[in-house]
Image (cartoon, grey):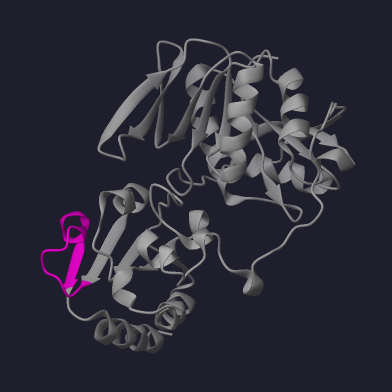
Amino acid sequence: MAGVYVVAEHRDGAFRKVTLEAASAAKKIADELGSEVTAVVLASGMADACAELGKYGVSKVLYADDAAFAQYTTDAYANALAELLKDADVVVFGASMQGKDLAGRLAAKLDTSVAVDCTALAVEGGKVKATRPIYAGKVYADIVINAKPQMVTLRPNVFDVVEVGGQAAVETISATAGEVKTKVVDVVKDAGGKIDLTEALVIISGGRGMKDGANFEILETLAGQLNGAVGASRSAVDAGWRPHRDQVGQTGKVVTPNLYIACGISGAIQHLAGMGSSKVIVAINKDADAPIFQKADFCVVADLFDVVPAFTEEVKKLG
């Protein structure tokens, strides 16, 4: 079936924010192409939630309710989607860990290409033009995929979630998981319900200047006040101060928060590649010549152990 499709990602019975962003972006593209947005939901027990995608521009939801799709596995999802989306014009994913894994496998099955980690979409000549960073964010490339379907993954927190109202029509379909070579035996969640770095609107990151892993507690306190998440540079992770899941950078996670506060981070190019597209960047460093200051919107040349606690106290006063 031709048209613009969104592959919905869910967790614990709810759609992830990156899916709502993808739906909103797909709606804009579909309007320019004179088409409609259809979401594909592979899940178990989410029928009631599917119609809510209509609020974000989805006209129709194809819902496959099967225990095989309750937990994401690459084989099951790729096998099912390859049959469902073989005639689609455009397929949109969130550039999450799942989205990037699935989009690559599905593109290979459908003999097409995928533009990954896109920061802008436009329509030119009846085709989607995707913009994405390359060379560690030094250059942005415009990409047009000539094969069908055109597939794109969208960087989280870059595209706005736009509510247009309404309910989506939900059609229950059958989908085949096919041969699945792996299975999920357990899901281990972070304690305390921490915000995923890729979805956080505020991130406070620490680097070598934190001096010790125990000192990250002051960043945790500030993050708690700002409803944010705590990240780390590679040097802090290599020192064992933070787990790898907290690493921001070229070999860690790429993030795009509204506010990124870099504490004691020099600003190596690998780190900038992971957070350079943040909307507002604040850098706190004793070294006035630190490269991070060339990228920051606000620069604080001072000891982070003086600045962060004082800033935290001021935030607390604001309630």
The answer to which of 23 and 305 lies nearer the viewer is 305
Viewer-side residue, 259 vs 265: 265
Residue at point 51%, 55% (across, down): 199
Q: Position of residue 15 (x, y in %)?
A: 67, 49
Residue 296 included in the magenta stretch of the image: yes
Q: Is residue 99 left or right of residue 1?
A: left
Return the x and y of residue 59 as percentages of the image width and height. 67, 31
What are the residue bounds of the magenta stretch? 285-300
Magenta stretch: includes residue 102: no
Residue occupying image coordinates x 54% and y 31%: 26
> Which residue extends farthest left?
289
Q: Residue at x 49, y 37 (%)?
A: 154
Left or right of 95? Residue 51 is right
Q: Is residue 57 visible?
A: no
Image height of 58 relative to 150, above or below: below
Could you tell whether 294 is left or right of 81 in the image?
left
- If the image is split into quadrants, where does the N terminus sit? top right
